[in-house]
Amino acid sequence: MKKICVGMSGASGAPIAIKLLERLKEILDTEVHLVMTHGAELTIEQETGYSVNEVKALSDFCYGLEEIGEKPASGSFNMDAMIVVPCSMKTVAGIVSGYSDNLLLRAADVTIKEGRPLILVARESSLSPIHLRNLNELAQIGVRIIPPMISYYQGFHTLEEWTDSFVERLLRALGMDGRVTEWQGM
Ligand SMILES: Cc1cc2nc3c(=O)[nH]c(=O)nc-3n(C[C@H](O)[C@H](O)[C@H](O)COP(=O)(O)O)c2cc1C
């Protein structure tokens, strides 16, 4: 059983996280541990037709932001990887500074300290020098930064088509081939 921690924070892109959670549900032998910030709850309401509880129900385990004693907060709980999708610049700043005052930030801190894969779907426009410095520092220590950037050459007609394709890319980054339903390893 592979364990993936999914963090959702308050950047634009809640539909990407929802699609990823739906796809992870289809993948065999995968357990999803979800932590969402209060900002994520706002973007879910503003950007999707889902309620916060419906999104939580897409995970196997969902924790409150204040539950800093829960499994994702512990290095001895062998999480295989973590993805923060979408990842706000505030959460990027919290991760890069090691300021782990909520469960999402603590889980990311643990992922880095244990040398496990961490992927950030970091989103803001425009990106300030502070954002770029923080993202660069994380990239330098091996955190994978995958911004939700639209490409025109793939010929998508709708945001939904682009979202589906982007989520398959995230699955590949997590070591899961989007076309199969088995864990492929990192
Ligand atoms: C609809 C909406 C969209 C937002 N989009 C972004 C964004 O794309 N990037 C970002 O860094 N912050 C964005 N914000 C602001 C963050 O939600 C805010 O800075 C929040 O404090 C982030 O906290 P969190 O990382 O704990 O969720 C957005 C806020 C709202 C309400």
Image: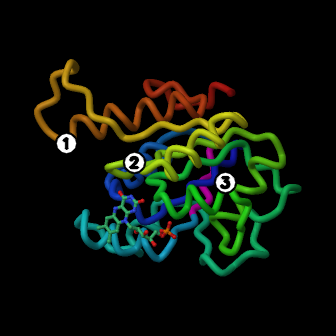
**Image position of 178 with respect to 122: above or below:** above
**Which quadrant of the figure contains the C terminus?**
top right
Q: Position of residue 32 (x, y in %)?
A: 59, 54
- Decide which of 33, 88 is in the foreground and name it: 88
In this view, the residue farthest toward the left is 157
Q: Marks 2 and 1: in contact by CB < 8 Å?
A: no
Q: Quadrant of the N terminus?
A: top right
The three-letter code of the residue at mark 3 reads Val
Between discs 3 and 2, the one toward the N terminus: 3
* Left or right: where 47 falls relative to 9: left
**Most foreground residue, 48 or 28:** 48
Choose the circle earlier in sequence order: 1 or 3.
3
- Give how far across and how far down residue 161 sits, in percent: 21, 35
Amino acid under disc 2: Leu
Residue tagged by mark 1? 159
> Is the residue marked by circle 2 packed among few (<14), some (14-19), or many (20+) residues within 10 Å?
few
